[in-house]
Amino acid sequence: MAGCFAEPRLSDRFGLPGRLWMTLLVMTLLTSGATAADPCDVDAALWRSRQIETIATKVQHANSKDERLEYEARGSWLRRWEPGQMPSAPADAPDESELVPEPLLQDLTRPAGVDLSAWRQMVDSQTRLLDVDSDDARKDNLRTTIRIASKLETDLAAQLADDSKTLATPTSWVLAYTRYRLGRALAYRELPVVREGWPIVDTDRYQKRLLAVYDRLTQQTHGDRAEFILLQDRMFRRSGNKGLALELLEANRRSIQPKWYLKKRRDLLQEIGWDPPYREAAKLYLEAGYDDES
């Protein structure tokens, strides 16, 4: 079947000629009221069924709680997926009604106790950070972004110590967004296209720095925050917890720009090695008008 992924010989598995077995299966599906008679969808349904069984076995024999949670997340996603019916990005995404936008220091009143010159310096740093860490120029400006964000985080934490582990004030949100931008820039350093021009020489030092920034953000936000979900998703992804990353992405799909939701879903499915849903996700990404160059 052209265009479908390769399958084991059905005659080997069921003791029936493959063509006869497939005919019987399709007739059974149609008789029971199923509407997906596309051979590729039938193949995907068979793949899904076997994969769910395999994951259930891995959950039972997991060596740790973390491993079990990862496989449970993968199984949860697969049980919801219906071949040929994968949804695209929500039409009303991103829903910003419950998101806290990044405050601008230049629009805020200088807090009592903060020196005027230090405040002006932080205002200037944030302005420059937002300029270089833009959607269009982000990957090209990583060195500058990391340098400015590191300095701004240090200054904010020193000048506004009470903001370091709370989201109670506008300036605390500035600090959280600064940590998010710093963590994202550091994580982007692992992208192949970035490493080619800017190799990570000291892997251990880099790893410690990224994890430390992410830990400070996590402590400050006290759990999941949709504003910073893409960094959390990337941290899951890079640690091998791709099922958890996929479920986190799905749970927050209405808070994410459609392009990034569709792209990251596609990429995660490919990294897990699930070819049938990956192909469907890749198709939806292209049909939405996106490509990896835009």
Image (tube, rainbow, N blue to C red):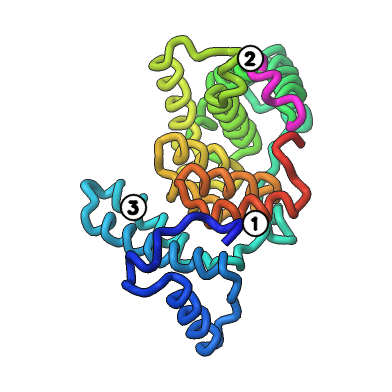
* Residue shown at the point (44%, 67%) measured from the top left: 46
Q: Is residue 156 above or below residue 290?
A: above
Q: Is residue 234 magenta?
A: no
| Numbered mark located on residue 69 in the image | 3
Q: Quadrant of the N terminus?
A: bottom right
Magenta residue check for 137: yes
Residue type for callout 2: Arg
User: Crowdedness of circle 2 by 10 Å Cα count: few (<14), some, many (20+)?
Assistant: some
* Helix, strand or loop status at disc 1: helix
Under circle 2, the secondary element is helix
Q: Secondary structure at mark 3?
A: helix
Disc 1 marks which amino acid? Arg
- Tell me: 95 left or right of 11: right
Q: Position of residue 181 (x, y in %)?
A: 61, 29
How far, Cα to Cα, is label 3 from label 1? Answer: 24 Å
Q: Main secondary structure of the magenta part?
A: helix
Q: Which residue is mark 1?
A: 254
Cβ–Cβ below 8 Å for labels 1 and 2?
no
Q: Which x, y percent locates residue 10?
A: 39, 67
N-terminal label among 2 and 3? 3
